[in-house]
């Protein structure tokens, strides 16, 4: 029989791996490309600054060269008059086809204008390019002071040359676009290489996904860890561990269902027989006897079904775990009150020995009560008439300790490990039982992080000791 819950889990595993692969590819690609784009954006900004500086440097050298050509054309005639014929080369060097306008000014040291525009602004420093506005045009200008032979003491002239920014901006744009196109190609190549790399790198993950998808409904054998890279092998090991747990749960469930069916078959057959006998019996006394036996068998089946349900709820993963704070003394007293009638019917001395201070533990309150009920009920069932059963609650260091002691026949030491197995019963025991009581106790105690041990009572019976973490 198959565990129904394992099917959706297996399907979810396959879908989770498929989703992980798709998102992993997208995320890796996005991170690689976005990081590359971010780096390129920074580089493009730096390239823009570099292109701007290069264009300024080229224009400044051109302005300085033009100013030198103009300055070298200045001369004096025999009468000492300063003469200047602007060389065409001084202005033609700015003719780059971008429609730039060139302005110049040549003045003597005493302020006389020799040639050019009288209102052209003067830079603050010589041989250093500066940006300014002249006649509604954005221009870059440069000043050169040049000594002229024959002008006496004040033999220096000032040459200022200015040019509009058209060529400068065009040069900067070409340099930047050249870098941009190269880096765009780099991004495209990097993106293509990244896609190919991701395809190859994620191929083992895709094989893992396909291996999970293609498995049959009953296949839970381990996957081969070497089918993926070393970084993903922990995932394969985790999947194998999960499938092993599912296999164990399925095997346990099959055993449980098989044992439960076996345990229910006999009392149900007996109930059917007893009902048939009661229906055929004409004698009132014998009919009542058959009906009494029928009621007893019905109680036995009801108890077995109740314990099966309790054991199912106590199993790990059967329901959402609860974390209640349980006061053990009050819970123990409540359990003893409910079982007092059975103890009185058999004249058994049922008592409670507990500390005065509250003793609290954390766990599922309902399961804790079921655990106590099964401990005390087991003791009552196997204790002879006029016997004694004592439930003890105490604190021992960081643990809360529960003890159930009786003066019944006890359990042989060789069989104390087996009695915690489901449906196990000691051969020769007379009281009717299902063999589930101690199995329920162990499941509840394990779920609460505690321990349970069996020992000999002082009067030769059984001593059950349960330790739970106290709060």
Image (cartoon, rainbow, N blue to C red):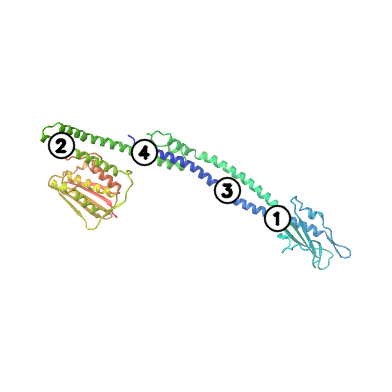
Q: For the residue labelled by badge 1, is the local secondary structure a helix, a strand or a loop?
A: helix
The residue depicted at 70 percent of the width and 55 percent of the height is 57
- In the picture, the disc for residue 57 is 1
| Residue that numbered label 3 is attached to | 37
Nearest to the observer: residue 384 or residue 167: 167
Q: For the residue labelled by badge 3, is the local secondary structure a helix, a strand or a loop?
A: helix
Q: Are marks 1 and 2 in contact (CB under 8 Å)?
A: no
Q: Name above or below for residue 153 compared with residue 463.
A: below
The residue depicted at 66 percent of the width and 48 percent of the height is 177
Extreme residue in the right direction: 78
Q: Position of residue 45 (x, y in %)?
A: 62, 52
| Residue that numbered label 2 is attached to | 291
Q: Earlier in the sequence, mark 3 or mark 1?
A: 3
Q: Earlier in the sequence, mark 4 or mark 2?
A: 4
Q: Quadrant of residue 249?
A: top left
Q: For the residue labelled by badge 2, is the local secondary structure a helix, a strand or a loop?
A: helix
């Amino acid at each position: 029989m198959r565990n129904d819950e394992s099917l959706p889990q297996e399907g979810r595993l396959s879908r989770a791996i498929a989703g992980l692969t798709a998102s992993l590819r997208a995320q890796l690609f996005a991170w690689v490309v976005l990081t590359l784009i971010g780096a390129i954006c920074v580089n493009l900004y730096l390239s823009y600054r570099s292109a701007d500086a290069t264009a300024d440097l080229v224009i400044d050298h051109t302005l300085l060269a033009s100013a030198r050509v103009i300055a070298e054309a200045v001369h004096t005639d025999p009468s000492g008059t300063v003469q200047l014929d602007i060389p065409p080369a001084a202005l033609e060097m700015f003719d780059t086809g971008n429609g730039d306008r060139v302005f110049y000014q040549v003045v003597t040291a005493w302020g006389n204008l020799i040639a050019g525009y009288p209102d052209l602004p003067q830079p603050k420093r010589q041989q250093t390019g500066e940006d300014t506005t002249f006649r509604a045009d954005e221009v870059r200008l440069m000043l050169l002071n040049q000594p002229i032979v024959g002008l006496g003491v004040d033999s220096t002239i000032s040459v200022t040359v200015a040019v509009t920014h058209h060529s400068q901006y065009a040069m900067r744009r070409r340099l930047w676009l050249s870098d941009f196109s190269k880096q765009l190609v780099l991004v495209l190549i990097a993106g293509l290489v990244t896609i190919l790399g991701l395809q190859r790198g994620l191929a083992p993950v895709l094989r893992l996904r396909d291996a999970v998808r293609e498995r049959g409904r009953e296949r839970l054998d381990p996957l081969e860890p070497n089918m993926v890279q070393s970084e993903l092998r922990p995932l394969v090991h985790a999947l194998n561990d999960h499938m092993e747990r599912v296999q164990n749960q399925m095997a346990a469930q099959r055993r449980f269902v098989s044992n439960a069916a076996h345990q229910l078959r006999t009392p149900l057959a007996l109930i059917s027989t007893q009902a048939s006998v009661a229906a055929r019996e004409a004698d009132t006394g014998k009919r009542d006897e058959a009906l009494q036996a029928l009621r007893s068998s019905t109680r036995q089946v009801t108890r077995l079904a109740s314990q099966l349900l309790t054991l199912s709820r106590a199993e790990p993963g059967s329901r959402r775990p609860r974390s209640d704070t349980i006061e053990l003394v009050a819970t123990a007293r409540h359990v003893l009150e409910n079982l007092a009638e059975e103890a009185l019917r058999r004249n058994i001395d049922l008592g409670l020995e507990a500390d005065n201070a509250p003793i609290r533990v954390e766990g599922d309150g309902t399961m804790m009560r079921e655990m106590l009920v099964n401990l005390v009920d087991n003791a009552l069932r196997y204790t002879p008439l006029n016997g004694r059963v004592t439930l003890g609650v105490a604190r021992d260091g960081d643990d809360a300790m529960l003890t159930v002691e009786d003066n019944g026949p006890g359990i042989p030491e060789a069989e104390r490990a087996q009695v915690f197995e489901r449906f196990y019963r000691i051969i020769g025991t007379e009281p009717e039982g299902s063999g589930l009581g101690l199995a329920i106790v162990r499941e509840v105690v394990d779920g609460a992080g505690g321990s349970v041990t069996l020992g000999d009572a002082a009067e030769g019976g059984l001593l059950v000791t349960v330790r739970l973490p106290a709060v």
